[in-house]
């Protein structure tokens, strides 16, 4: 008789435990690395079909990637899985008739081009080349393809390059020989090979012989390390390829003069289309009727963070003009609308990356969507398809009408996983910074925020320095992870940040330790007054790259502001830094010339000159493959603190570059960073 009530009680307890287990929990790095990741999204020419790649990760951390098809004409349609082969299919594009797709995959042991019919059947390997294909783009009629492959410029065919790569891998000696800069870039020593462009015909399901249209050139096309096939395009008539590249020269390491070049698809001499501009030209994009070529162009030679202007060239008359020259934003991408007279662009804008509509005739600019960090996927007759991320959204695809109405979510690739995560609430704030000018930032409440409590501060300082910690979701520096660990997060877009007008961005150059430090000091004071739950007396600051420089600068110039610091890949000695970094154009612009030309400014803002003031406990982190800020900068800071008895720790990653990319290393990174911060703020 007593069993039934007992069972009922156990059942109720079990239900309570089940409900409790289902409650979302504060965000952790283990959850971050297991989030599904979308990539390679593309839309059919008729705007009715969407294909995207999705890397899914199970509870054990094992991942797989496949392609999915979504019918955009059916609001109730579910994604249809297209592939199940091992490996990753990427760089997806639709055939001209929209009945099949192309993609790159390593199914045959190297990266080759495949075609998959959407009506059923298996993917067919289109290319069988001796080298990996790194990227490709189809011509408008689908009869030609331009490929990016890494070859040796002196070779006349692919077999020669293949043999040289093989010989190099089998060489017994290990010395590398150079006669000019750049000898290394980002995380790779130069091997004397270059990314070249090849054009071939697509006949049936096979690729015919390819022609190196950049034959013999000592150039990287597309530019490395971060550019892709957005820097390469066919002319609409299929007769030429237009691409961005530097001219072969010995000044590669100290110039930003990328030009647009046009070369026949049959090969031969290339024509420089932008020789009059000695700054950066990028992303050639043609209207479908071939009348106009739009592209992005900077104006200041040597300055990688200059404002990109939208240029429009009439291919009939040859006249070129800047579209919307008074619009004080710097677009990062651009697409023509079907009317061939309207452009849709993305640009950073006050803590967001927004989508804008630009009239090429009159220069009118209109905001279409401005919440979060957005990237355009496609422009159809009446809709835009785009990827959107926020501080609480890892990334999904959406559509919106071209007049900015009717926002629709198309995918929910992390729906179940996000249901298990509790994020901190966030809000943008502003204050009066240097020169009493408006400065913006974000705060995030701890995930388990309780009214009336005071919380320690994680003060995140972005890199660049021309960058931004905006409304975005990162796979590395993810602000919500500090909120998940019980910190109030503060991020300030100090003078020099992007998205607030070019004058604001320019203001940091030759003033690295001036305006930004004042903004950071005023920002922390202001947000602490605005949000009383923040405890400014119990704060840690942390940053990477320029943010790491700022940690070293704070040590010497604001040494009573924080309980602890975290310096990731920070610059410690500007003198040695100038002579070992790979892109010399960067320090030369930021500090007004070479080190020997302008020693005074380099030394004025050199953290090593203020080490007598250092006293704040600091964790130093660096990657041994970091060639942008070589790891001796981190070692030097750590060595000094150890010798002077300042509490300090060092975390070195032999297999990482300027960023931490491997999931296991990311877990170790956060364990060390949060452990270090907890030690000094939660005593």
Image: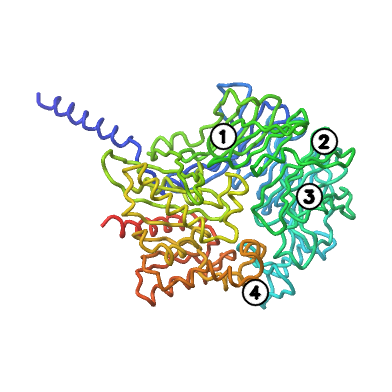
Most extreme residue toward the front, as rendered? Answer: 435
Q: Which residue is mark 3?
A: 243
CB under 8 Å between discs 2 and 1: no
Question: For the residue labelled by badge 2, is the local secondary structure a helix, a strand or a loop?
Answer: loop
Give percent across and percent down for residue 98: 73, 30
User: Which mark sits nearer the N-terminus, 1 or 3?
Assistant: 3
Q: Secondary structure at mark 4?
A: loop
Residue, disc 2: 141
Identify the residue shown where x is 31% and y is 47%: 455
Mark 3 vs mark 2: in front: 3
Q: Which mark is residue 213?
A: none
CA gap, disc 2 and disc 1: 34 Å
Q: Is residue 138 visible?
A: no
Q: Position of residue 470 (x, y in %)?
A: 51, 44
Q: Residue at x 48, y 38 (%)?
A: 393
Q: Which residue is mark 1?
A: 370
Which one is nearer the viewer's eye here, 209 or 447?
447
Q: Earlier in the sequence, mark 4 or mark 1?
A: 1
Q: Nearer the viewer, residue 601 or 574?
A: 601
Q: Which residue has dot 4 on it?
A: 596
Which comes sooner in the sequence, label 2 or label 1? 2
Rounded to the nearest whole Å, what is the CA distance between mark 1 and mark 3?
A: 30 Å
* 355 relative to 657, above or below: above
Q: Earlier in the sequence, mark 2 or mark 4?
A: 2
Q: Residues within 10 Å of mark 1 (few under 14, many from 20)?
A: some
Quadrant in which the C terminus is drawn: bottom left
Q: For mark 3, does the 10 Å Cα neighbourhood hold few (<14), some (14 to 19), or many (20 or more) residues?
A: many
For the residues labelled 2 and 4, the Cα–Cα distance comes to 54 Å
Kindly identify the residue that appears in the image at 47 percent across and 64 percent down. 553
Q: Residue 216 is drawn in which quadrant?
A: bottom right
Against 542, is 349 above or below? above
Q: Does label 4 or label 3 sit earlier along the sequence?
A: 3
């Amino acid at each position: 008789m007593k069993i039934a009530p007992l069972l009922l009680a156990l059942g109720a307890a079990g239900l309570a435990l089940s409900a409790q287990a289902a409650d979302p929990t504060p965000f952790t790095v283990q959850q971050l690395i297991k989030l599904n990741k979308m990539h390679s999204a593309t839309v059919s020419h008729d705007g009715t079909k969407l294909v995207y790649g999705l890397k899914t990760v199970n509870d054990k951390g094992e991942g797989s990637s496949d392609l999915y098809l979504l019918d955009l004409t059916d609001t109730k349609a579910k994604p249809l899985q297209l592939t199940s082969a091992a490996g990753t299919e990427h760089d997806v594009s639709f055939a001209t008739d929209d009945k099949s797709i192309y993609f790159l995959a390593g199914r045959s042991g190297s990266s080759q081009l495949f075609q998959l019919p959407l009506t059923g059947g298996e993917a067919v390997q289109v290319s069988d080349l001796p080298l990996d294909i790194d990227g490709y783009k189809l011509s408008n009629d689908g009869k030609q393809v331009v490929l990016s492959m890494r070859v040796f410029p002196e070779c006349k065919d692919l077999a020669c390059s293949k043999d040289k790569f093989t010989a190099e891998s089998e060489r017994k000696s290990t010395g590398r020989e150079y006669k000019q800069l750049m000898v290394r870039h980002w995380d790779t020593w130069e091997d004397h090979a270059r990314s070249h462009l090849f054009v071939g015909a697509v006949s049936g399901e096979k690729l015919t012989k390819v022609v190196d249209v950049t034959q013999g050139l000592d150039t990287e096309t597309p530019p490395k390390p971060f550019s892709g096939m957005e820097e390469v395009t066919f002319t609409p008539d299929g007769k030429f390829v237009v691409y961005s590249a530097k001219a072969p020269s010995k000044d590669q390491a100290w110039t930003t003069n990328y030009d647009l070049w046009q070369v026949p698809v049959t090969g031969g001499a290339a024509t420089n289309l932008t020789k009059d501009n000695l700054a950066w030209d990028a992303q050639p994009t043609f209207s479908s009727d071939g009348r106009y070529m739009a592209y992005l162009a900077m104006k200041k030679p040597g300055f990688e963070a200059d404002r990109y202007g939208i240029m429009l060239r009439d291919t009939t008359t040859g006249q070129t003009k800047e579209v919307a020259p008074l619009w004080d934003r710097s677009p990062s991408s651009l697409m023509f609308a079907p009317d061939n007279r309207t452009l849709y662009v993305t640009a950073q804008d006050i803590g967001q990356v927004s989508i804008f509509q630009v009239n090429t005739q009159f220069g009118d600019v209109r905001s279409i969507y401005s919440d979060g960090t957005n990237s355009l996927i496609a422009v159809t007759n009446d809709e835009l398809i785009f990827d959107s991320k926020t501080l609480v959204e890892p990334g999904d695809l959406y559509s919106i009408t071209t007049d900015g109405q009717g926002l629709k979510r198309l995918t929910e690739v992390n729906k179940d996983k996000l249901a298990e995560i509790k994020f901190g609430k966030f809000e943008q704030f502003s204050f009066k910074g240097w020169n009493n000018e408006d400065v913006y930032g974000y705060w995030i409440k701890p995930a388990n925020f309780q009214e009336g409590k005071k919380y320690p501060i994680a003060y995140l300082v972005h890199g660049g320095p021309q960058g931004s910690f905006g409304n975005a979701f990162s796979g590395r520096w993810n602000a919500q992870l500090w909120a998940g660990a019980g910190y109030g997060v503060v991020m300030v877009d100090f003078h020099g940040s992007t998205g607030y007008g070019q004058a604001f961005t320019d203001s940091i150059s030759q003033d690295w330790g001036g305006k930004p430090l004042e903004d950071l000091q005023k920002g922390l004071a202001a947000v602490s007054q605005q949000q009383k739950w923040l405890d400014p007396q119990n704060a840690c600051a942390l940053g990477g790259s320029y943010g790491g420089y700022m940690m070293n600068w704070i040590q010497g110039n604001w040494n009573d502001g924080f309980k602890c610091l975290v310096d990731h890949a920070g610059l410690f000695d500007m003198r040695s830094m100038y002579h070992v970094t790979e892109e010399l154009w960067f320090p030369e612009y930021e500090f007004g010339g070479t080190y020997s030309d302008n020693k005074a400014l380099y030394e004025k803002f050199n953290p090593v000159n203020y080490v007598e003031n250092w006293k704040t406990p600091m964790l130093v982190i660096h990657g041994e493959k970091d060639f942008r800020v070589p790891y001796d900068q981190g070692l030097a800071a750590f060595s000094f603190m150890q010798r002077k008895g300042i509490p300090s720790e060092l975390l070195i990653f032999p297999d990482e570059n300027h960023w931490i990319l491997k999931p296991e290393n990311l877990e170790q990174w956060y364990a060390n960073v949060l452990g270090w911060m907890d030690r000094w703020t939660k005593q």
